[in-house]
Amino acid sequence: MATKQSSTHLYTTRIDLQETTREKLVQLLNETLAAGTDIWSQAKQAHWNVKGKDFYQLHLLFDDVADALYEHIDTIAERITTLGGIAYGTVRNAAQNSFLAEYPNTERMHEEDHLIALADRLSTYGKHLRHGIDVAGELGDQDTADLYTEVSREVDKKLWFIEAHLQKQK
Ligand SMILES: [Fe+2]
């Protein structure tokens, strides 16, 4: 049974951000951690199972996307603990707390289906990250806002790489 995250437990810290502010940031960052772990595993799912005439370049591209997402998981989790929170970072936490849709039925997917599935999820994750930039900024934590900006820019770029396979001129 997965453990539901609790946003209320905070450690004391000398950081000059109020406890109520840190609580909100930790809650938000744990949502991001769950979704980040989820989408990383979904990119791996595409990397392992893609089929089609462009198999090899998509196999590499999906791994590149997964690697980029994975790198940020650590940054997000460590910002949570820096703020005195607990990082809920197991795959069971991710399964219970991620706001992303589960990956579609892989048995029925061809290469374009993987591209569409990842584009949809990168877009949803990217929207959440942009929201995180605003929320962290409004809470007076420019460091967390900067973290969200960095991750957001990277996710936008990976979305471009994926969507470039699907885009048609109007
Ligand atoms: Fe691999």
Image (cartoon, grey):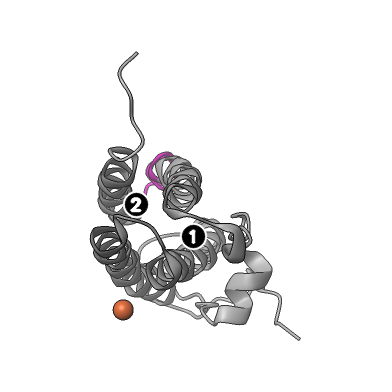
Residue under pointer 1: 32
Percent position of residue 142, x then y: 30, 49
Percent x, y of residue 139? 44, 46
Tell me: 158 left or right of 33. left
Q: Would you say residue 118 sits in the magenta stretch?
A: no
What residue does disc 2 label? Answer: 148
| Of residues 99 and 58, the one drawn nearer to the viewer in this rendering | 58
Q: Does 139 appear in magenta?
A: yes
Residue 160 appears left or right of 45 = left
Tell me whether circle 2 and circle 1 mark residues in contact (CB < 8 Å). yes
Front in this rendered view, residue 37 or 109:
109
Q: Which residue lies furthest to the front in this view?
A: 53
Q: Is the magenta stretch mostly helix, strand or loop?
A: helix
Percent across and percent down for residue 157 are 25, 45
Crowding at label 1, few (<14), some or many (≥20) Cα neighbours within 10 Å?
A: many
Q: Nearer the viewer, residue 115 or 100?
A: 115
Answer yes or no: is residue 127 visible. Answer: yes
Q: In which quarter of the image is the C terminus?
A: top left
| Earlier-in-chain disc, 2 versus 1 | 1
Instruction: Report whether 69 appears left or right of 18.
Output: left
Amino acid carrying label 1: it is Thr
Q: Is mark 1 on a helix, strand or loop?
A: helix
- Residue at the (47%, 71%) spot, across then down: 41
Magenta range is 133-140
| Above or below 112: residue 14 | below
- What residue is at 49 percent from the left and 60 percent from the top? 32
Residue at 31% from the left image edge and 54% from the top image edge: 151
**Looking at the picture, does residue 142 appear above or below residue 20?**
above
